[in-house]
Amino acid sequence: MDSQDNPIHTSGQLFIVATPIGNLADMTYRAIETLKNVDWIAAEDTRVSGRLLEYYDIKTAMFACHDHNEAKVAEGMLERLQAGESGALISDAGTPLINDPGYRLVRKIRQAGLSVVPIPGACSPITALCASGLATDQFTYMGFLARSGRTRTLQLQAVADAEHTCVFLESPKRIVKTLQHLASVVGSKEICIGRELTKLHEEFVSGSVSEVIAHFDEHAPRGEMVVMVGVSQVVEEITDEMILIEAKKEIYTTLSPSARARTVAQKLNVKRSRVYDVLMAGL
Ligand code: SAM
């Protein structure tokens, strides 16, 4: 072990331990050892985490720490840490505090002068982003968008205006409605949805917003998902049929074939010679 490495078990510390987001094998060695060695584990839902602990034969005592009791149990946790115990916080899946409880607890423990040690691992927005093919040098993570109202409108506008990738979480029940809202503001930006990551039916659906809506028309949205909106516009491939439809428009009928090819080529951003060939073959 490098001297810089954090020791696995030190008294008076709270460990923030990431757990898998689907595939149980995505548990780090350090996460397992930490959960085995601490005096107690505070879990978002003890029934959900019970299955993980059983899988890894972790026998440490567990109690619940969720949004509704966090403030209350935090006091007890602080006292136990001050008395020299060590503890771990886990959520149902992924990295605690990332749209999961724990922020108030971590703040309280740090303000009391005790150390909070992160044990990194799975995190759905990062897992989705790294395989999306969208720009990753800068991104905004937005958690779950507001369900309605002015905040939602402002959030969607921020996604439309962003010059970097935007990442947010959405449920399968609301995804189509959200994509429809998105379509009305983001135009042809490229999006990618990471679904059921690390699980049997893992899937990445990419394309323009309307293409992704069409995908979900055919395959009903299911499972957990992360939505990513990229910066680049989707470049629609111009087919010969599209060239012909454009060239046959009445506005061009007074032009010579060569002038018509030049004008249509400029409009569709394709080579003039290609338009000319299509024109000669199809008119
Ligand atoms: N803390 C968690 C993390 O680090 O991934 C996120 C917790 S948040 C309450 C749960 C949401 O995360 C889900 O509704 C979904 O949007 C996303 N999520 C969690 N697991 C996922 C997975 N395996 N595939 C895709 N999205 C996932």
Image: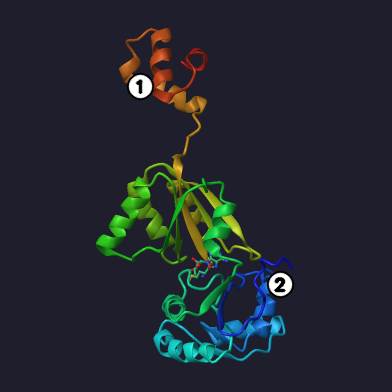
For mark 1, what is the residue? 249
- What residue do we see at 45% from left, 63% from top? 169
Residue in front for this viewpoint, 140 or 178:
140
With respect to residue 255, does 38 lie above or below?
A: below
Residue 221 shows in this picture: no
Kindly report which numbered mark, 1 or 2, lies closer to the viewer in this rendering: 2
Image quadrant where residue 203 sits: bottom right
Q: In the rendering, which numbered label is found on residue 29?
A: 2
What residue sits 48% from the left and 72% below the top? Answer: 97
> Where does the image place residue 56, in percent across and percent down from the top left?
71, 81
The crowd level at tag 1 (other Cα within 10 Å; few <14, some 14-19, many 20+) is few
Inspect the image, locate mark 2, and give the three-letter code of the amino acid beneath it.
Tyr
Q: In the rendered image, which quarter is residue 90 located in?
A: bottom right
Which image quadrant is residue 19 in?
bottom right
Residue 129, above or below 169: above
SS under mark 2? helix
Where residue 259 sits in the image (x, y, percent)? 39, 9
The quarter of the rendered structure image containing the N terminus is bottom right
| Residue 117 place in picture, x, y as percent | 56, 74
Task: Answer left or right for 134 relative to 25.
Answer: left
User: Which residue type does callout 1 highlight?
Assistant: Lys
Kindly identify the residue that appears in the image at 56 percent across and 50 percent down: 132
Badge 1 or badge 2: first in the primary sequence: 2
